[in-house]
Amino acid sequence: MEMVAKDPGEASLSQVQFLTVAEVAAMMRVSKMTVYRLVHSGELPAARVGRSFRVPKDAVQDYLRNAYHDAG
């Protein structure tokens, strides 16, 4: 069964690449605790899998892109 994106620009769920909190922390060069804070505050969307979180790779890239513009 193929999932249909609500928005034409939205990727289907099967195409989303999910990262662990440790991978996001390494990518952003911050601590895992910083990533957890971003997830819990709602600044970084994440899916809960059991007791773990998985963050869409595109969401991390969007966050960094927006943070870069805000800083400067």
Image (cartoon, rainbow, N blue to C red):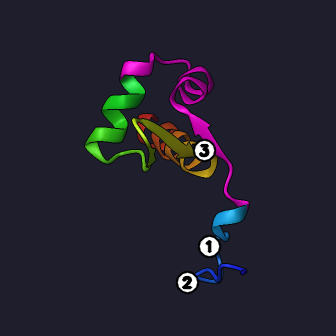
Q: CA distance from mark 2 to mark 3?
A: 21 Å
Q: Nearer the viewer, residue 54 or 44?
A: 54
Q: Can you name the residue that lies furthest to the left here?
A: 41
Q: Is residue 11 left or right of residue 20?
A: right
Q: Is residue 20 above or below residue 11?
A: above
Q: Quadrant of residue 51?
A: top left
Q: Is residue 33 above or below residue 60?
A: above
- Residue type indicated by callout 1: Glu
Q: Residue at x 43, y 41 (%)?
A: 50
Where is mark 2, residue-wise?
6
Q: Quadrant of residue 15?
A: bottom right
> From which residue to which does the magenta span run?
15-33
Discs 2, 1 touching: Cβ within 8 Å:
yes
Q: Nearer the viewer, residue 23 or 28?
A: 23
Q: Is residue 41 left or right of residue 26?
A: left
Where is mark 3, residue-wise?
61
Q: Earlier in the sequence, mark 3 or mark 1?
A: 1
Residue 52, image x, y percentages? 44, 35
Discs 3, 1 touching: Cβ within 8 Å:
no
